[in-house]
Amino acid sequence: MKIKVKFFSSHRDAVGEKEIEVEIKENSSLNDLLEMLSEKYPKLKELKDYTVLSLNHRYADGNSRMKEGDEVAIFPPLEGG
Amino acid sequence: MHGNSPTDSDSMASDSITLTEEEMARYSRQISIPEFGKAGQEKLKNARAAVAGAGGLGSAVAIYLAAAGIGYIKIIDDDVVELSNLNRQILYSESDIGRDKAHSAEKKLRAINPNIEIAGINKRITEKNAVGLLKDVDAVVDCLDNFETRYVINDAAIEIGIPLFHGACMEMGGQVMTVMPKRTACLKCIFPNPPPHKKTPILGAVAGTIGTIQATEVIKFFVGMESLLTNKLLIYDSRFFSYDIIELERNEKCPSCGVI
């Protein structure tokens, strides 16, 4: 199935893209997606501890399952003030 | 309507605050906003807010809260003004370099609006003093530059039962969320792990964008307007001029506000 993944801030820098389309097997979880993306973009691994996820514009944990056409966002907490 | 809204709080309704002729003129352009009116302006005059951090976000937040006529503003920071602050910290001028931010800010804000009470507090917020510093205000605005202290004011706001208006920025973007303690997601629900602390690059105008969104939230809250960024994380990226809103919910197991 195809899903859309958006990256923000340090995660966008790690991937070098603002948005990508990913082919992933049916019923995969967000953790599966992160693992797959970390293979392709190793810098994502360094950000793992403070990676925040959303699925279809809703905050989600890594166990959430995706379906065809879903939109995932991957981003960090921002710190500066 | 939010349960924590000052419109239904006894402490806010008990004082009968009236506006002077000068104040009616000063705030006339916002009093004429349909949701405001004279009653809305009186609520602002009776409102008490703390601005935690007087940097890039805190500058924009404090200036707009003062200009809008928030009756009492406590601005808390223990830093001194440095040259490298001046690209974004619009509360300060070159003549403030080397002076403490809290009192420089107090002076500037008083010049903007002499009708309101301003307290510059030259202290670092810690676990020990946070509740004491925040218990005499109705809202706290998170303009800090580190998560360690953010978690401290998050917990203090939950303990006291006042809303927290979170903002943060980095480089060309930022994020905003509003927390109604024990009713909507708190900082710890959403960001259980902080990023590693470092000096963050920030464009001043972007800190201003995020700070003005926070100030708008605070004013809307005090006036009693709905549709705040509660259970919502707004992510702004000026590189692409994108605004994304992520829907949030409380984590029942949250170490700060959870019920389990």
Image: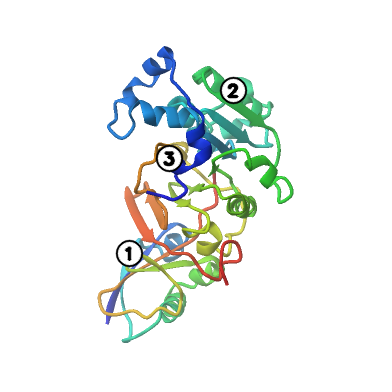
Q: Amino acid at mark 1?
A: Glu
Q: Position of residue A55 (x, y in %)?
A: 36, 70
For label 1, the residue is: A19
Q: Is residue A34 above or below residue B215?
A: below
Crowd band around label 2 with a 10 angstrom C-alpha radius: few (<14), some (14–19), many (20+): few
Q: Is residue B239 visible?
A: yes
Q: Is residue B56 visible?
A: no
Q: Position of residue B29 (x, y in %)?
A: 32, 23
Helix, strand or loop at label 1? It is: strand
Which one is in front, B6 or B55?
B6
Specify the label residue B94 is tagged with.
2
Which one is in front, B214 or B172?
B214
Specify the label residue B200 is tagged with.
none
Same subunit, labels 2 and 3: the answer reads yes
| Mark in the foreground, 1 or 3 | 3
The mark that comes first in sequence, 2 or 3, is: 3
Crowd band around label 3 with a 10 angstrom C-alpha radius: few (<14), some (14–19), many (20+): some
Q: Residue at x 61, y 49 (%)?
A: B160
Helix, strand or loop at label 3? It is: helix
Q: Amino acid at mark 2?
A: Glu
Q: How many marks?
A: 3
Q: Amino acid at mark 3?
A: Thr
Disc 1 to disc 3: CB gap under 8 Å: no
Same subunit, labels 1 and 3: the answer reads no
- Label 1 – label 2 distance at C-alpha: 42 Å
Q: What chain is tagged by disc 1? A: A
For label 3, the residue is: B7
Which one is in front, B74 or A24?
B74
Residue B41 sits in quarter: top left
- Label 1 – label 3 distance at C-alpha: 43 Å
Q: What chain is tagged by disc 2? A: B
